[in-house]
Image (cartoon, rainbow, N blue to C red):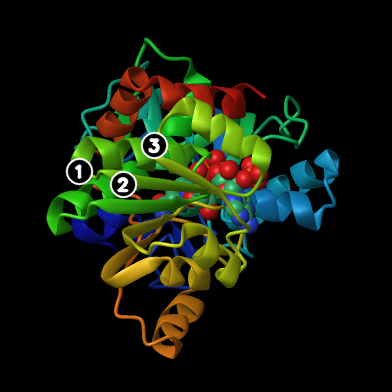
Amino acid sequence: MFGPTERALGLHRVLEPAGALPQAALRLDAGPEIGPDEVRIAVDRLNLDAASFRQLAESCAGDGAAVRAAVLDIVATRGKMQNPVTGSGGMLIGVVDAVGADSPLGLVPGQRVATLVSLTLTPLRITDGLSRWDGRSEQVPAQGTAVLFARSIAAVLPDDLPDEVSLALLDVCGAPAATARVVERTGARSVTVLGAAGKSGSLSLAAARRAGATRLTGLVRTEAEAAALTAAGLADRVVVADATDPLAVAAAVAEPADLTVVCVDAPGAEHGAILATAEGGTVVFFSMATSFPAAALGAEGMAADVTMLIGNGYTPGHAALALELYRSVPGVRALIDPRVTE
Ligand code: NAP
C-alpha cells in the first residue's frame, strides 16, 4: 500500500520495476478508473517531443504508417508514451473528464487543459488506433485517456489561441523560462542559441532579450532558416552551421557567449555548445538529445570552465511566459506558426 506522498508521485501506477518512479518505470498501469487523488483526462491530441519524433521518423525511414505503429506499440507496451531510444515523451491536451474528491489540482470536469508533466510519466491509453494521424507530424490527434497525479501540473488552455499553437508552446515552455532565469541570475549579456529558428529556440531568443541580454546570436543549419530568422528579427546576428560539427560551430559563432542554449532536436551538439561558450559562462542543454557523458567529459577534455545546466521542463511561471512571448513578439509567431500548421 502506498501513502499519500507516494501516490502523489504516481508510484501506485508503476507495474515494473517495483519502487521506480513513473518516469523511470518500464510499465505503468494506464487503466481509466481513477483514485480519489487523481484526475482523468479525455485525450484530444498528443505532442511528441521533437527529439523523439525525429528519432522515430528516421528509424522508420519516413514511413508514416510505421511511425504510427511504433507509437501505438510503445503506448500499449509501456502504458505511457516514452520513446525507448531518446527516453523523451512530450505532452498532451484534452478535456478534464473526472476529478477525484481529494485531487489538489483544482481542475473541474469539462475544462480544456494541457498537461505540463511529461508523457514519459503520464499513464496513457489510446482507444482509436491513432486513425486520424498519418505519422508525419509531431502533433498526433488521438482519442483515449490519461491520468494526472496529485503532484502533476496542468494548465487550462487559453481561449485566444488555436489548440495546436498552445500545445506546441507549452511543450517547450521550459526553454524560455530557463533562459530568462540564467540571464537574470548571472547577468549574461551575450547569448547564443543553437537551433534558433525552432520552437524552443525562437522563444529562448525572445526570452533572453526580454531578460536584458543585448548581444543575441542565432545559429541555424540552413540558409532558408537563416533568412526566416533574420526576417523575424529575434537575433542581432544569424550564423549558419551544423550544430553537431564543433569546429564549425566555434568558427561560426566566433565570439564565445556568456550563455549558450541548445535547442536542436538532434544528438551531438554538446561539444560545439561548449566551444561556443565563454570561460565562466553557462550552457543550458534543453535538447532531449543531449548526452550527459558527452557534455561532462567533453568539457573536462577541453578544460572548459563552464556551468552546464540540464534544461528543466519546469520553472514556476513557464507556461505564462511562453504564451505571453508568442502573443507579444511577432517574430516568435512568424517562426512557430509554420511549424505548427504544416
Ligand atoms: P524544433 O522546433 O524542431 O527545433 C529544432 C531546431 O533545431 C530546428 O530548427 C532544426 O532545424 C534545428 N536543428 C536540428 N539539427 C540541427 C543541426 N545539426 N544544426 C543546426 N540546427 C539543427 O524543436 P523544439 O520543439 O524546439 O525542441 C527542441 C529540443 O527541445 C528537442 O530536443 C526536444 O526534445 C527538447 N525538449 C526539451 C524539453 C525539456 O523539458 N527539457 C521539453 C520539450 C522539448 P530543421 O528544422 O532544419 O531540422
Q: Is residue 87 above or below residue 18?
A: above
Residue at 57% from the left image edge and 71% from the top image edge = 247
Name the amino acid, label 2. Answer: Arg
Quarter in which the C terminus is drawn: top right
Residue at 37% from the left image edge and 24% from the top image edge = 326
Name the amino acid, label 1. Answer: Pro
Q: Is mark 3 within 8 Å of ligand 1?
A: yes
Q: Which residue in the protein does label 3 denote? A: 203
74 to the left or right of 147: right
Mark 3 element type = helix
Name the amino acid, label 3. Answer: Leu
Q: Which residue in the protein does label 2 denote? A: 215
The foreground one among 128 and 305 is 305
Q: Is residue 278 above or below residue 155?
A: below
Q: Which residue in the protein does label 1 denote? A: 316
Sooner in the amino-acid sequence: mark 1 or mark 2: 2
Residues at circles 1 and 2 in contact by the CB criterion of under 8 Å: no
Residue at 43% from the left image edge and 27% from the top image edge = 332
